[in-house]
Amino acid sequence: MRNPYDNDWRSITAAIYKKPRDSKVFGSVELDVTDLEQYVTEKRNQKLKITLTHVMLLILARGVHKDVPELNCYVRRGRIIPRSSVDVSLTVLGTDGNLSSIKVHHAERLTLAGLLESMQHEVALARKGQGDHIRQARGLLPRIPWPFREKMADFVRWITIDLGLPLPFLGVDPNSFGSFVLSNLGSIGLDIGYPALAPFSNVSMVVTQGTVTSKPVVYKGEITIRRMLTMSAAVDHRVVDAMHIGKLFLSLRRQLKHPEQLEHPLED
């Protein structure tokens, strides 16, 4: 009988992660999303079936593109390489209870309606276990006996990350995960979470979105109940530092005041 705790993803993580030694920077910010939730409700009443996650994905993508382009880079052979577009990996919960992912291409150029359209098909496939852009690797690695599994993971990382070459037979390449990863931890009941940087993801940042909770806060000089959301990020310290997280979170706060701008293409 198979150990129920020893699923395919756990087998992969045991192979790719080492003991903590790599340099990472963590940061978090608490955002007032009271007005944003009202905006989302209005859009849904207008038949635009968006969620807070759709809004946050676009705000992050636009913030990286316009305000913190340093976050849209990666390390290859000791050099910092900029990306030409902001592609975002979004984790989604599959019907089997495991996390899967989809990739949103050129997210900084999309509107809310465009994002919704591009995601619907990919999310449907991902929840069936068919749309994950690393599904081939996830299906193969757990079936390799230990300790060869770890050697295989190191080989994949060396080829795709260190050398910057694709491995078509595994369905992975240096940009398999895009510019950054967004994970909605609130969907699984976590108010806040500090993410890990997957060794072969080649992203400079992983962002988590927590649960929206009602809290007493000081608003316009008075204590009142507001809807609060915690966003957290882990960044690759080889590429950026805490200052860049701060710039991104300032961009988040600024854009949250005008979510209607996401209904129109980004202007350079």
Image (tube, rainbow, N blue to C red):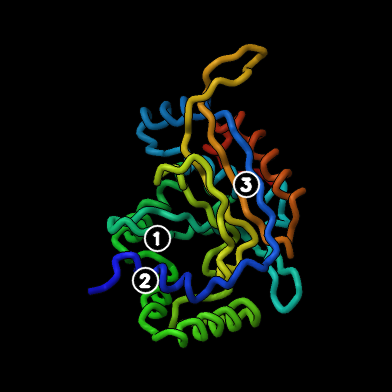
> Residue 200 shows which numbered tag?
none
Q: Nearer the viewer, mark 2 or mark 3?
A: 2
Q: Secondary structure at mark 1?
A: strand
Query: For the residue marked with disc 1, what is the amino acid?
Result: Ser
Give the percent coordinates (x, y) of residue 203: 61, 63
Q: Which residue is mark 2?
A: 8
User: In the picture shown, does residue 267 fall above or below 41?
Assistant: below
**What whole-number distance in Å separates the C-alpha atoms at marks 3 and 1?**
24 Å
Given residues 198 and 77, the one toward you in this image is: 198
Of labels 2 and 3, earlier in sequence is 2
> Residue 62 shows which numbered tag?
3
User: In the picture shown, does residue 265 fall above or below 201?
Assistant: above
Given residues 20 and 73, the one toward you in this image is: 20
The answer to whether residue 72 shows anywhere in this view is: no
**What whole-number distance in Å separates the C-alpha atoms at marks 2 and 3?**
34 Å
Q: Which residue shows up at 35% across the image and 69% down it?
A: 6
Q: Secondary structure at mark 3?
A: helix
Q: Nearer the viewer, mark 3 or mark 1?
A: 1
Give the percent coordinates (x, y) of residue 253: 65, 34
Question: Quarter of the image holding residue 249?
Answer: top right
Q: Nearer the viewer, mark 2 or mark 1?
A: 2
Crowd band around label 2 with a 10 angstrom C-alpha radius: few (<14), some (14–19), many (20+): some
